[in-house]
Image (tube, rainbow, N blue to C red):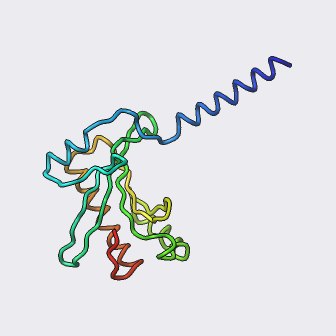
Amino acid sequence: MRNYLTTATRLILTSIGAAALLAPLPTQAEDNSVKRRLDSIGQKYEVDKDGDFKVVFSFPEEKRTQMVFVTGAAYDVVGGMQVRNIFSAVAKVKEDAIANKAADLLKANNGYKIGAYEIAGEYAWFSMKVPDNATAKQLLEAIQTVASVADDKEKELSGARDTF
C-alpha cells in the first residue's frame, strides 16, 4: 500500500511540476532590451510601477491619444521561445457593455494574424505577442499597430470618449 501512495504522490507532483513549466510566466531576469530598443529609435516612454513600458501615441488629426504598454519582462512560451506582450485598453467591460459585444470582438479576432482582443480585469484590450528578439523597428511597428487598432476600437465602442 505504501508504494501505491508514493507512486501516486510522485505522479501528482510530476504533473503539477510539468504544468508549471508550461505556464506562460515572465522570465525572472530583469533586462533592459526594450529600453535599449526604444532609446535607439528615439521613442519616448515611461516605466510604470509594474515595470512595463508605457508609450503614448497621438493621432493629431482626430485629436486623440492612445496608451500602449510593452511588458518589462519576456514570457517563456514553448521551445525556449520568448515573447513580449504589447497591449492597449479599448474599453471598460461594464461601462461599455462589452458582454453584449463579445461576439463581435471574437469575430474581429479572426482578421488579425498576430493580435487579438482580450478581457483582463475590468478592461477589454487589444494585445499582440511579439518575439522578444524583434528589432527596434519591428517593435515600434507592433506598438504603433496596437495603438491604431485599439484607438479605432475604442472609438467604435465608446463614441467620442478618449479614455485610453
Q: Residue furthest bottom?
A: 159
Residue pictured at 75% horizontal, 22% vertical: 7
- Residue 92: % across, % down: 45, 70
- Picture quarter containing residue 3? top right
- Residue 24: % across, % down: 48, 42
| Viewport quadrant of the N terminus | top right
| Viewport quadrant of the C terminus | bottom left
Compared to residue 155, the image places residue 121 above or below, namely above
Residue pictured at 21% horizontal, 68% vertical: 58
Q: Is residue 111 left or right of residue 65?
A: right
Q: Is residue 111 left or right of residue 32?
A: right
Compared to residue 104, the image places residue 53 above or below, namely above
- Residue 104: % across, % down: 49, 73
- Residue 28: % across, % down: 40, 34
Compared to residue 83, the image places residue 161 above or below, namely below
Q: Is residue 21 left or right of residue 136?
A: right
Residue pictured at 64% horizontal, 32% vertical: 15
- Out of 88 and 79, give the one closest to the viewer: 88
Q: Residue furthest front?
A: 49
Q: Residue furthest top?
A: 3
- Picture quarter containing residue 110? bottom left
Residue pictured at 42% horizontal, 77% vertical: 157
